[in-house]
Amino acid sequence: MTAATAIRRLNAADPDFARHLDHLLSWESVSDDAVNQRVLEIIQAVRTRGDAALVEFTQRFDGLEVAAMADLILPRERLELALTRITAEQRAALETAAERVRRYHEKQKQDSWSYTEADGTVLGQQVTPLDRAGLYVPGGKASYPSSVLMNAIPAKVAGVPEVVMVVPTPRGEINEIVLAAAAIAGVDRVFTIGGAQAVAALAYGTESVPPVDKIVGPGNIYVATAKRHVFGKVGIDMIAGPSEILVVCDGQTDPDWIAMDLFSQAEHDEDAQAILVSPDAAFLDRVAASIEKLLPTLEREAIARVSMSTRGALIQVADMAQAIEVANRIAPEHLELSVENPQQWLPQIRHAGAIFMGRYTAEALGDYCAGPNHVLPTSGTARYSSPLGVYDFQKRSSIIHCSADGASELGKVASVLARGESLTAHARSAEYRIKN
Amino acid sequence: MTAATAIRRLNAADPDFARHLDHLLSWESVSDDAVNQRVLEIIQAVRTRGDAALVEFTQRFDGLEVAAMADLILPRERLELALTRITAEQRAALETAAERVRRYHEKQKQDSWSYTEADGTVLGQQVTPLDRAGLYVPGGKASYPSSVLMNAIPAKVAGVPEVVMVVPTPRGEINEIVLAAAAIAGVDRVFTIGGAQAVAALAYGTESVPPVDKIVGPGNIYVATAKRHVFGKVGIDMIAGPSEILVVCDGQTDPDWIAMDLFSQAEHDEDAQAILVSPDAAFLDRVAASIEKLLPTLEREAIARVSMSTRGALIQVADMAQAIEVANRIAPEHLELSVENPQQWLPQIRHAGAIFMGRYTAEALGDYCAGPNHVLPTSGTARYSSPLGVYDFQKRSSIIHCSADGASELGKVASVLARGESLTAHARSAEYRIKN
């Protein structure tokens, strides 16, 4: 296989470049009627039959012999036990990561505020945590302890009193590192259920599972579809698309480093997207060669190869200014600025989930332990949305406390505007408070 | 008609109270297959035929004779003209309201931050405004100038360079106060289109309408359905349910005031919900009498009467503590604490869109001019969401800039965790940065 077949090359000078780029980025998640129907049935069953439905679905879908809901509850002690079953190195790594994630997220915490006007009227905003958050953790192969930290810690920093985690254990497989991460992150309760049934249980509650206010965390198409359906009853985080990285390089970073950075997205799944932009054509050649050389050495070669060849690209641009333009057009989940003096470009970056500055900041560091969250907006949604954060587990209430004088003056303004909208009960309610 | 028929009475001491309350609050929006199908067709037509489809739909649905898209564009000068066509009193009221809304929302603005660790690693968050926001304003009867202020001003305070407004003008009806509000709020461009076609145009763009990053503002079932469908391509604000007010009163406020405060929600539409909670049974009787007395005096009596009788309630509780419990259970859009010393209860309010403190703070003041936003979470969603605010028009990018030393140390941690997840390209990408 030659370099040309492993990954496509684009040039921003090509008159058709914008169209090619649009095509490369295009991604619409398929909404399958059969999946929708199945998920709606599962939600209905959990709403009407509660625990009994959970036990039944878990037997059927996870191949588990469970007699009753009690078999699907892990007490806090079981999480603590997991801490003793992983290696000391793993435990230390989890603890370091958790500590860094906690420290970063503390900075996101928002406080209530208020101000008093001359007439004594007080205006403000009261910030409060959610009462209870639900965390979905996939089972089996895609079960990531790092996701437990990234989803649970912001909730705890926000002050959420109860974080409930669900994680399926297909055929009884328990991931001890996931449970250890839950213990470290401060998860309060764990149920070993998964799929649409777990989402339904968190949204509506059952005899055993308490209803939560918001459900976060990644999952397969059944989980994502269920989250869409329960949205409104509870809050949800984003529905994530495939993971992406955009590396902007000035041509001075080791091409093997850049190739491996691209692979660190490409190995996630075949739809993942890894793109490199550089003004240096010869460097793009060198990275293409590194890709060829290193692909066969990857444990997840098959996945990475499909991802690189179907959704990857090496893009040549005229200069760094054009590279930044391309980055803003893509609004990538992960943006690596593998360049000299990355600070000079930062103010021009308008849209990106997370920005990895300089040659040393591998995207993988952000996935695990740098501190910022690894749950990030995908598929260009960084144009209008943000990383998962403490702010996702806090909400605000406006505070208005009018003095008698303030209500009288504001009443006059409200009266005029309400009458302009023909809402006369509004007007009269305000007018009662106008002083004679 | 007797008091008993105008509004229902509940008592929290009733053993069935929780069930009655659940029933009273229950609200599920109907998702109509026919509407869905129609909206999907309209979106598809606008995506493929652009302006031509907009002209066609506007002729058909708004009964407008328009030859071309140019007839559906209002230049900034037309907005300025509207300022001269409303009364001086109206203009002054709009300007006062806008100024107060602006001042309050300035406090919500979030700034970028960063911190440097001992080894030189920099972590932070870059806050940026959306590039372009779209504001939907309903035409005809439900065309509210106050909504223009409440939706456009937070976007402008956030620093959004371009705010695009769409407002249908059925049979050519133009609401001059709406255009004047747009001029005052700083709206940049106005298109006189509406319905699902306007939402589709804002989401995907046409030859004339620029695509936006987020669409906000209220609308009918077609608009709400279209917003649901374009969500993901662009951001949207909430899909609002019927408006609600919960008044908690200690029995010492004028019962006419309280009745009119309840009506100020009830007059919105027949599904609106107005509830009063008080520990004073005799006071509930007095309010019931005021309701009877005042209902016939309302311009929108018919609507208010249906709303009060089908969704309203007077709830008797044992004491203020129980009143607050009920408030937290309901998580109301608007909560009026019409009591002596409301501050003492504030820390116990966990969920409410906006809190109106004391006897003078009529909810209507908040609808128009107090300062806080009137776009608020409905149907109990205040449990996990917030008023519309500047934060809805800003987004965050995580910043990670590792020093060589920082990358080396973090690389060791990331390597252990990545290998624990069998993501070895992640591990190797991090390991390249570990110093020997």
Image (cartoon, coloured by chain):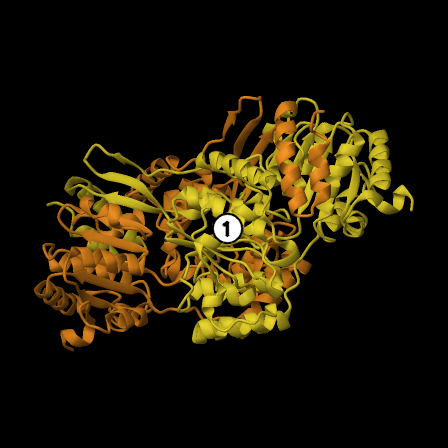
Chain colours: A orange, B yellow
Between B139 and A25, the residue placed more toward the observer is B139
Between B290 and A170, the residue placed more toward the observer is B290
Between B73 and A256, the residue placed more toward the observer is B73
Percent across and percent down for residue B436 are: 10, 45
Does residue B119 appear left or right of residue B167 in this picture?
left
- The amino acid at mark 1 is Leu
Percent across and percent down for residue A91 are: 32, 43
Percent across and percent down for residue A387 are: 38, 49
Name the residue furthest right: B1
Q: Is residue B184 visible?
A: yes
Looking at the rendered structure, the secondary structure element under dot 1 is helix
Q: Relative to A412, is A318 above or below?
A: below
- Quickly name the residue at label 1: B81
Identified at 53% across, 64% down, the residue is B193
Between A239 and A302, the residue placed more toward the observer is A239
Does residue A234 appear left or right of residue B152 in this picture?
right
Name the residue furthest left: A282
Q: Is residue A78 visible?
A: no
Does residue A375 appear left or right of residue B415 in this picture?
right
Does residue A189 appear left or right of residue A154 in this picture?
right
Q: How many marks?
A: 1
Q: Relative to A105, is A34 above or below?
A: below
State which quadrant residue B247 falls in. top right
Chain letter of the residue beneath label 1 in the structure image? B
Q: Is disc 1 surrounded by few (<14), some (14 to 19) or many (20+) residues within 10 Å?
A: some
Q: Relative to A329, is A374 above or below?
A: above
Percent across and percent down for residue A271 are: 33, 68
State which quadrant residue A295 falls in. bottom left
Identified at 72% across, 24% down, the residue is A436
